[in-house]
Image (spheres, grey):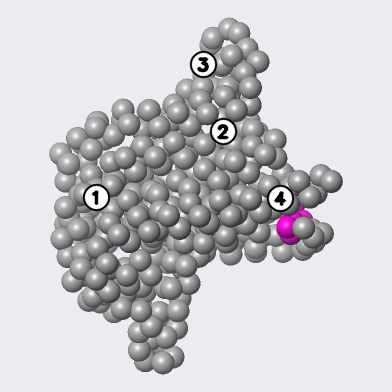
Amino acid sequence: MLSDIVRVLVPATASFLIGMAMTPILTHYLYKHKAWKKKAGKTALDGSQALEFNRLHETHEVRAPRMGGIVIWGSALITIIGIAILAQLVPGPAFLSLDFLSRNETWIPLATLLVGAFAGLIDDLLVIRPGGEGIPLSFRLFIVLILSSFIGWWFWAKLAVTAVDIPFAAPLEIGWLIIPLFILISLALYASGVIDGIDGLSGGVFGSIFGSYAVIAFAQNQVDLAAFSAAIAGGILAFLWFNIPPARFYMTDTGTMALTLTLAVIAFMTDNLGGGVGISVLPIIGFLLVATVASDVAQVVSKRFFGKKLLRIAPLHHHFEALGWPGYKVVMRYWVLSVLFAVVGVIIALAALQNSVL
């Protein structure tokens, strides 16, 4: 039997290599079919024209294709299904022990990844049409609401998850309120997908986050979930290889919707269900996602109730651009911070796990 470390490292490596191999083929077709927005420009959350953003990014949105997120979920999916098939076809324990497609740990996050990827892909395909606007935000939020409601119910009714573990304290019993909590976290994480706004930014941030949860799941002996998280992290790194400035493509909704919704599931699975504190450390590990959503909310509130903008541009990373920071400087500083917050979150999660064992 292979060691648990190998069972996690092999999917991560395989996903990365598959992502690297599939990207030239994917980008060939994306460029061939001109899979980018045909007209640059965005509107703000309040419906007004995002003039400052459009001034800074008037050519960025139409210089590279969308749908780069296919590399992430595509490489992870090929890895998961490929290893599962090999485990059935090749005799011997090696491939069988590598198979991490399991009902109790990876079915739910895999299903969420695919639903989010498919919904985001439809939106991207609509956006790249001449004059295309994509799926209306209200309908996308409705999709997230329906999906998260079902999964939240599943955690409560089928998996008997009724509490949130608190680091170094007793679990917080909330009963059926676990359902609206999951919905709220899913919506907030989906909103954070707007961090996909500068070349290389989202890949570095999401890579740190999923790598962190791979470590946490592994420490909690959720090896299949750790392998799943590591496979996604491997796909993200392959995407990031081609997304550093100047980006060959953008992640867009098929990537951000898949990743953010899957992250919510993984956080819950590494919480009370896995004997850890996956939910409590999510705001730490994903602090830059929190800051992204908070800056958007603060901007809207400030404009509506005080009649002025709090930031030059929201979300926060574009504000730094408007202040004169080059895009690459914003990205690299976000990378540093994402690793820092990831390390802090993992340390807290592992310390809380050790404390619960003692």
- Pinpoint residue 19: horizontal percent, then vertical percent: 36, 33
Point out the tag, 2 or 3, that comes first from the N-terminus: 3
- The x, y position of residue 227, in whole percent, is 56, 33
Q: Which mark is residue 227?
A: 2
**Residue at the image position 44 percent from the left and 26 percent from the top:** 14
Per the picture, the main secondary structure of the magenta-coloured stretch is loop
Query: Tag 3 or tag 4, which sits nearer the N-term?
Result: 3
Front position among marks 4 and 2: 4
Q: Disc 1 residue type?
A: Pro
Closer mark to the observer between disc 1 and disc 3: 1
Assess disc 3: are there few (<14), some (14-19) or many (≥20) residues with their C-alpha within 10 Å of its C-alpha: some
Residue range (magenta): 160-167
User: Would you say residue 308 is visible in this rendering?
Assistant: yes
Q: Which of disc 4 and disc 1 is earlier in sequence?
A: 1
Quote the CA–CA distance across marks 1 and 4.
37 Å
Q: Residue at x 35, y 79 (%)?
A: 311
Quadrant where the N terminus is found in the figure: top right
Report the residue marked by disc 1.
Answer: 245
* Discs 2/3, front: 2
Q: Which mark is residue 86?
A: 3
- Residue with the mark numbered 4: 351
Indicate the amino acid at tag 2: Ala
Asked whether residue 144 is in view, the answer is: no
Mark 1 element type? loop
Q: Please provide percent x and percent y for residue 281.
A: 62, 57
Which of the pair 146/96 is nearer the observer? Answer: 96
Q: Earlier in the sequence, mark 4 or mark 2?
A: 2
